[in-house]
Amino acid sequence: MASELKVPTMAEFFASGTVPEVLFWVGCAGSFDDRAKKITKAFVKILNKANVSFAVLGTEESCTGDPAKRAGNEFLFQMQAVTNIEVLNAYEIKKIVTACPHCFNTIKNEYPGLGGNYEVVHHTQFLKDLLNDGRISMEGGHFKGKRITFHDPCYLGRANGVYEAPRDLIRKLDAELIEMKSCKQRGLCCGAGGAQMFKEPEKGDKDVNIERTEQALETKPEIIAAGCPFCNTMMTDGVKNKEKEGDVQVMDIAEMIATAEDL
Amino acid sequence: MQYLPNIIFVVLLIVGIGFFVKNVSRLKRNIFLGKEASVTDNKPQRWKNMAKIALGQSKMVVRPIAGALHIIVYVGFVIINIEVLEIILDGIFGTHRMFAVLGPVYDFLIGSFEVLALLVIIAVVVFWFRRNVIKLKRFFKPEMEGWPKKDGNFILYIELVLMVLFLTMNGADYQLQQMGAEHYAAAGSFPISSFIAPMFEGMSISTLVLIERTAWWVHIAGILFFLNYLYYSKHLHILLAFPNTYYGKLTPKGQFRNLQSVTDEVRMMMDPDADPYAEPAEDAAVPDKFGASDVQDLSWIQLLNAYTCTECGRCTSECPANQTGKKLSPRKIMMDTRDRLEEVGKNIDANNGEFKDDGKQLLNDFITPEELWACTSCNACVEACPISIDPLSIIMDMRQYLVMEESAAPTDLNNMMGNIENNGAPWPFNQMDRLNWSKES
């Protein structure tokens, strides 16, 4: 295993009078959820390996307000947004990368109207750029020929039209990318969006994540790739529900790259 | 007496179009019961969207069979209007096939109308089978019982009858032309109705004229009837699809509107100079209600959406909540909004232009919180709509009302919101622990 993670904070950069290339917005899931923390660490390992000058806000970061807004609490959302924007603007942040499509969507689309204007990219887009610029190289050894299906996160795909960056990365791993019957524009939700993650689902025939996992399993994948910590949790639960955790792994694309590079 | 048919025709035309104009003005009045929404931005893109989505039917073909059939009916409808124009002019002036002066062009036109008419008949029959025999799942949801089901079939019957009348009219005409009947000069080409013509063989000229005239009159009367049927039907989309796609959302689907009234409040709270105990100014406007509980709280674009909805159910069949058996159906949200808006409109008409509280509203009486809370805000319904309707925006506005006006969120969500407020995260973790992951192995 590689050495300890280097995770500089904005405050440290500020103290030394320098500015990082990009702010890594970790998000609540990436900070606190045990499964999502692995994604965060994998992404940081890649950033460290590629010598990207980045920083996190650390304890100065707060919820973007996305779940509050989707739940209907516009007031709480805007309080969160305005507070976050004050912090971001104080550090004169220009570019933000995040591994959470919900944070990505909110900061990119909803913060500008409240005074927060930044270039916001999803980590799959950022990784693709690193690859294009030759700052990371990828060997597909570990994943060569593996059957991988990609689950489009609603807030990355339909909500913002990002479909290709994650797919390009999977292809770069020499993996066999198999599409589910509902993919891209017609991708089926994992069931967590719109604040559903934080409540019991309404009564129905089954839970959305089970339906989506069934669609994923139909492709007979070895790996279900995800690009969102919430999708990751929902799909992992779905795979467990189907008692397939022995055969099928749910992995974030950052984790796949970190694994391929043995980081 | 010679001019009697012309007079009857003109009266029929005036009455038919008069009623239609009245319906349109009622429609406009109802739509503008909604709140103002600014849509003056990016006109080129808006025109482009209208051309592509409404005129070009770009999103219909996502489902190829329904898409292809729909394009036939649509093209048939648009092009046959040239024939309707001739019928109207003939009716007013007492002429017969006055465009025949176009010669070969006319032959080509009539010929292509006939082919289209046949294709429309085929498409309509297939549509009918899909609805009534194959029973496509999306046409059999709870909201499709009663009028919506009948309406869907009525439209097919009317279209079928209109096309059959058109071909019968031409067939009889063709026969009359063959017989050299007075007034029926040879004009037009009849690739389809010439196959009907043998049915008329051996009939007298007067019988044929009766058949031709009857088909002609019923055809035009049918068209005028259909024009007035629109207002009561999902078929209104043939008109409203155009403005609706023009006014459709241009920002990314994930971008939800930031409520200005909330922004004002938040700014004041964050302003260190603001006096929290200050009396509101004399002329201060009554603060906006947060979110929507009835149709008047929605924007006029959302109400236009409701009238434009074709009840095709593509939204509902793509909705993850609906697919997994939950009560939410985005189509029902649109249909409920239209039904309630119609009810409000009738209330206003009955009370001399003033809305009298009827003790009802869109929320609870039409749409239940259970439906609203089932939404994952995934935008599948918005993406699926072939004519740029946004059911999600209505769902979100109503959630805002539930949460900010009624504090009626599910307990779990209240916990989540409490956590965000206190800890800056939806879970009960301390903000000071946010960086702990970096030290864990």
Image (tube, coloured by chain):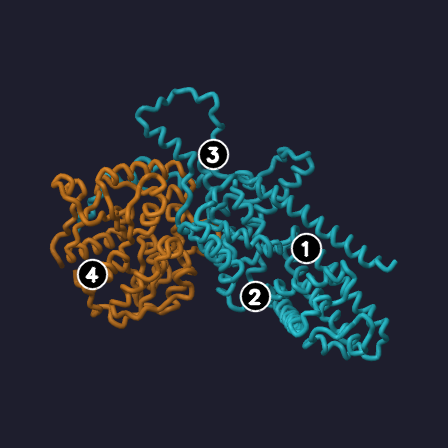
Is any part of residue B316 visible from this angle? no
Q: Amino acid at mark 3?
A: Glu
Instruction: Please give the letter of the chain rendered in orange.
Output: A
Q: Amino acid at mark 4?
A: Asp
Separation of marks 3 and 2 at Cα, in angstroms: 45 Å
Determine the secondary structure under disc 1. Answer: helix
* Mark before the other along the chain sequence, 3 or 2: 2
Relative placement, left or right, of B9 versus B309 is right
Determine the secondary structure under disc 4. Answer: loop
Instruction: Please give the letter of the chain rendered in cyan.
Output: B
Q: Amino acid at mark 1?
A: Leu
From the image, tell me which residue sits under label 3. B405
From the image, tell me which residue sits under label 4. A133
Q: Are marks 1 and 4 on the same chain?
A: no
Separation of marks 4 and 2 at Cα, in angstroms: 46 Å
Residue A222 in the image: state x and y as whole percent.
30, 67
- The disc placed on residue B227 is 1
- Which tag is nearer the camera, tag 3 or tag 2? 2
Separation of marks 1 and 2 at Cα, in angstroms: 20 Å
From the image, tell me which residue sits under label 2. B71
- Marks 3/2 in contact by CB < 8 Å: the verdict is no
Is any part of residue B269 visible from this angle? yes
Separation of marks 1 and 3 at Cα, in angstroms: 42 Å
Q: Residue A74 is drawn in which quadrant?
A: top left
